[in-house]
Amino acid sequence: AYNTQYRAIVLAAKRAGCAQARIGPLLTRIGRMFGVKVHGLMSRRTVSRVCMEAGVRVDMQIGHELARAKAVCLSSDGTSHRNIKYEARHLTYLAPTYTTDPTAPQTESRTRVVEVNHALDHTAQSQYEGWEVANKKIVDAYLNSPLARRDAEEGLSLDSDDLWRKMVSYNADHAADVKLTARKCTEKKAAVAESDLGKAVLKDMSTEEVEEALWEVVQEVSEDPDGLEAQYVLSIFNFALPPALRIEAMQSLAAYLGSKAMEDLPEHQQRRLTQTIFAGCCSHKNHNCALAGVTGMEAAWALLDLIPPVLLANKDNAATIALATNTDSDAVERALKASRRGGYKLTSICGSLFRNKDDKKGHQNLHCHFFSKVKFDITGEHSTIKFPDTSNNRFGSHLDAAAELVTYHSAYIQFLEIIRDSKQTPGLNHAEQNAWNGLNDTATMTECCVMTLYKLAVADPYFAATHKKGVNHIDLGPFHDRLITHIEKLIATPDLLLDPSSPSEDATLDGLPFGDQFAVDSVQFMAPRLPHLEDILIAFLKATLPAWKRFTPEFAPDSIINSLTPAEKLLISIPPTSDDNESLLGGWRDFSRTYSSSTVAHFSGYEAYHRNGTEAFSEAKLRTEEDAVYIMRLARARDASGAMRKFRDDLLAFKQQAVDTARAKQKEKADEAAARIAELTAVAVIIDAEKLCKLNKAALREQLDVRRELLKESVIAATKLKEMKNKPDMLKAILASDQRYASCCTARRPRDITDLFCTDACTLRHWKPSKRRRKHSLFSSLGVFC
């Protein structure tokens, strides 16, 4: 068999992008260059097995480190790729460094990749169950290994509940499903804590007390408590129970006793045992608060009674708006609602033109060549930086794009002119015309300038502070307090950003010069031509304040973080962002495009091996032949388990179940609608005002429902029922609806409503129903009383 060093080289070659089938010949050739004869040519299949072995080594490493850890932070995120859900999971704790330098730190805060794996859906329950499965895989791989036996001699142990015992925080974005996942994990932690307390109580109880309490629990959990005693009990102190029932009863008893013991603990100890810190990703905080500012900025134009930015509608909506003869029509209203305007929309359009996520679209290479020359002429430095990736909605990409458009505003107008005039038929397509309109619109460029100032004064310094190496999330409370104070200062004195003579150190969050002084100079140069710049800037900043407070609840005065002691804070390490999850999921997307036939388990194993520093762990802890044999056997067992086949079957069964459920709901809904139509069809339609006035409220409501649900007259159907609660309102609405309906039909053939409804045979005359009315067969069965 190939030794550990040779296998490590295989993994390095695989990570460098070498195809599995080419790694064996490559290593043989390298060995020949150094005069080393390699016996046998490693096959593609063996390379695949080596990657599986890397996953086993990762699980053993995490198990070994969890046995030593005192506090653990869980982190996860999900994405969808090719209509399959994937979940990335990480753990953060104080881990050994495996360094051979005695003067170097022996432990550091490290974030370890647990796995990236597929999932049936992205619900909180599925995410929590994914953690349970991953935890079991780690514990089983570690406990059955020779390493666990050696660790046991040093007093280290691990069981399946240790992850929950040591869990102190959950780090993720601010989505509702992830927050619910964190709550489910916290509930599991509390259940484990109560079980531990209950087991401690059981140890102090006598055998008779335990058996008596156990018997009471057995009677509660048994499906047949009356027949239980006759079947199993010999005496109160000596009765035989089936093993499964006894285990279940003991667990229930421990949980019950633990809950009682928990109530007797001081409040601060209960919080430590039953609660966790939810640490929201700081990158998502930054992104979401910037979006809140954009929303407030867009709303400020109407609030301040100012002319808003030019509408940047897509091609279809623009045609609907331009060709409509009635500007108040529903189609125009829908087109206007679906269309956006302003700086954020302009950056999206420019992103699709200059850096589209589909590399076959847009002016991407031409843009790079043109602006590399523009930037060289200005700065004297060569730049190959592309347009910010707004097409993929990267963190801060819209703020970066706004700064780009402001800084090189005239160059972008010149670039669009080149595009326009270089075509065989000179002109701009719709997207290019929208970009041109936005760049030449004062209000739109005002928003771009505001986004640029916020980026340089707040967003960029915040990003830099939260991405420094060694930053712990629990230490960021004072920093967020300073952030809110700084935004309030900018609202009170916007000249800190707008006045060229104001020192930049007073305007930035970190007290350092602007990261891009050229962009600030460009804003200040354009400011005299932007009369509402200050008002829109203040509106943007004001909108971000409540967002920052809403997205930082973990730093509230009564939060768990503020109740921690200095000694506890030293044990807890929480990453400030969930960028590791985003990176891992992005890596899988790229990997799956290049190696479409590979599996996610294959990628997860060797990627975690490199990210977790598992090679250093293996050299320090897995040096025996016994370890190598165990790892190879477990890897082959996993490879032969048919995990992908099982997932395929589970996925198809899950999808079929979803289809069956949806179809059942659709059928139920259709049956209810048919029953409702039949019920309303049986109602005699009354159009005489005197007879309608004599009806009671229930009968009048029936007449109203006929017109709303059966005849579907547009105005009354769109009117909310709460506006027609009493009889006068219902009567007024019915009469108005009949009049409109009669007028509509008169425009076709009938002359008045008495021509529409027949008085003797409950049928229609002089009127041919439209397709929609024929579809429902309404009037063939309506009873009409004039």
Image (tube, rainbow, N blue to C red):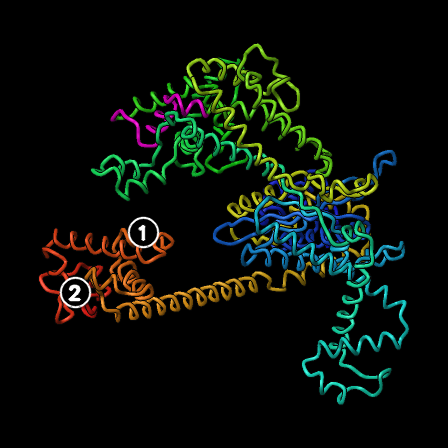
- Residue 3 seen in render: no
- Residue 621 seen in render: yes
Q: Amino acid at mark 1?
A: Ala
Which residue is pictured at 21% across the width and 56% down the height?
738
Q: Amino acid at mark 2?
A: Cys
Residue identified by numbered label 2: 786
Q: Secondary structure at mark 1?
A: helix
**In the image, is 562 to the left or to the right of 741?**
right
- Numbered tag placed on residue 718 in the rendering: 1
52 or 712: nearer the viewer: 712
How far from the left and from the top, in percent, is residue 505?
64, 17
Residue numbers of the magenta segment: 425-447
How far from the left and from the top, in percent, is residue 574?
71, 42
Considering every residue shown, the one lying at the far top of the view is 501
Closer to the N terminus: mark 2 or mark 1?
1
Q: Reply above or below: 11 against 192.
A: above
Q: Reply above or below: 642 against 572.
A: below
- Numbered tag placed on residue 693 in the rendering: none
Calculate the distance from the C-alpha at mark 2 to the C-alpha at mark 1: 26 Å
The reply to whether callout 2 and callout 1 are in contact (CB within 8 Å) is no
Image quarter hosting the C terminus: bottom left
